[in-house]
Image (cartoon, coloured by chain):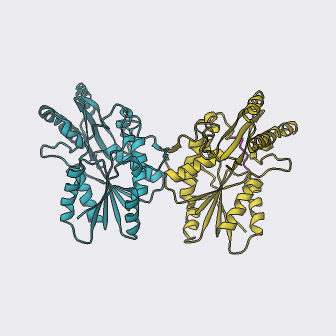
Chain colours: A cyan, B yellow
Amino acid sequence: MIKVFTNRKDFDHYRNSLESKSVGLVPTMGNLHKGHISLIEQSVADNDVTIVTIFVNPKQFGPTEDFDKYPRTLDDDLAKISAVALLIVATKDIVVYAPRTNDGIYPEGFSTNISISGVTSKLEGAIRTTHFDGVSTVVYRLFAITKPHIAYFGQKDFQQCLVIKKMVKDLDLPFKIKVMPIIRNSEGLALSSRNQYLSESERVEAMKLPTTLQKIEKLIKTKQDYKSFIAENLQDKRWDYLEVLDAENLETPGDKTHDYVVIAAYRLGTTRLLDNIVVTVKG
Amino acid sequence: MIKVFTNRKDFDHYRNSLESKSVGLVPTMGNLHKGHISLIEQSVADNDVTIVTIFVNPKQFGPTEDFDKYPRTLDDDLAKISAVALLIVATKDIVVYAPRTNDGIYPEGFSTNISISGVTSKLEGAIRTTHFDGVSTVVYRLFAITKPHIAYFGQKDFQQCLVIKKMVKDLDLPFKIKVMPIIRNSEGLALSSRNQYLSESERVEAMKLPTTLQKIEKLIKTKQDYKSFIAENLQDKRWDYLEVLDAENLETPGDKTHDYVVIAAYRLGTTRLLDNIVVTVKG
């Protein structure tokens, strides 16, 4: 059985009752898929209590983005979390905090913005200029409310993970961040809530994204020229970006780079798909 | 005897050794006067340990402002704090954290900005557009490093006090903020590090600031028309602003206003003097 809270007061009361139990946080916008489930399972393995938050955060959507049409599927989400909860030992708990309104997350008259510069300046940050401010600010609020020991994020949102790690470092937040691997379908497409927007033919075209990243991964590993391969690929105007960067800081790779990230956004109709692969090169 | 730390590691070691002792924070940019001393004395009265930070924060100065010429008077400051320490009971401590470089406050590669909107949009915030971002961000860092139970600020920087209280609320920071009254010289001029920039004749002209505020205070208390008095006064172009606002939120006073703030900035040569009076009107 899972506990579900929709009210801040009730949730706070519950959180305060946990005392010294270890707490993991899995922040989500709902519409859960196996990627989210893998975060929940890792948190259950690591902690006494796992808090899954479900909140579609208006602040991280731009004015022309899909906030209104973002899928809200609370009943389905609770069923999926309950299925996980059935399989865990009796000493562990999974609770869901799914506030129905913004005041479940933001205090009355909230007017603070937390903005990380540098790592937000390119890729998603260059295209969605206020997105990461919305992300860092809501994640701060989720941390403040749930007070986790460890928070779990998916590598699929690679730049988001760097932004959150930077915020945690810059603000001395007492939380550990664990980044979990991308979960893919049997063909290799990274799972995403946005995949359901794809038509049958777009699903086929979408395979261009993981296959291109894999090819670049191979070129890096075998020390072949990936730059001209990327330049050729960028003739296809559906790439919003397709880049190889230093995975630590998203700078142009240099002599000190050991971990590369091959990272891309690919547009199919009005749907933007994200994917990335981290490549570690030794010596 | 006071303890003085200039190195982050040494200070952290000391802070961790305090365990459950109650800690008060008095954040300053040095160049201490009796206004600062009153904050230190209140903190000593309230807490086991008082931490005075001395750090001239570059982030809160605009590009054309007086960061370089801001007076650094560490020896004098330590002498003044020592004089206070001589008079306190042996169970109480005063320590000074005065880092010599920015990395004593900001972690390496720091790139986070904390910005409060609303209350920062007028008065000082309208004139010094990045000032309050610098203030809220450095105060956050000072909180993170010193982990106080109570932090002390002077009412002279009235808008700054509102900004910090808003940040503490919005970010659920576990610190209490105490705002202490303005300390004035025998003529009534609010003490400020910037007063020393004034020439003899400017010191005389500066009295226009507190006397005007007092007159407006009287007009409010006796329910007379203060608006035309302000309008007349604003003929004098040395006022950067001279306003009566709701002291809770700096909005235009309305039916719900009980506490008014009469608040002004007055320019004498290149020096800007700030002052304010809070007026409570009953019924």
Residue A72 point in image, percent of width and height: 26, 45
Q: Over which residues does the magenta segment extend? A: B68-72
Q: Of helix, strand and loop, which mostly describes the magenta segment?
A: loop
Residue B172 point in image, percent of width and height: 49, 55
- Of B173 and A151, nearer the camera is B173
Residue at 70%, 66% in the rendered image = B2
Q: Residue furthest bottom?
A: B90
Q: Quadrant of residue B6?
A: bottom right
Residue A152 point in image, percent of width and height: 32, 55
Is residue B260 in view from this perspective?
yes
- Of B140 and B235, nearer the camera is B235
- Of A161 and B237, nearer the camera is B237
Is residue A47 in view from this perspective?
no
Residue at 58%, 67% in the rendered image = B14
Q: Is residue A48 left or right of residue A175?
A: left
Residue A56 point in image, percent of width and height: 33, 45
- Of A10 and A221, nearer the camera is A10
Check residue B70 for magenta coloring: yes
Q: Is residue B83 left or right of residue A80?
A: right
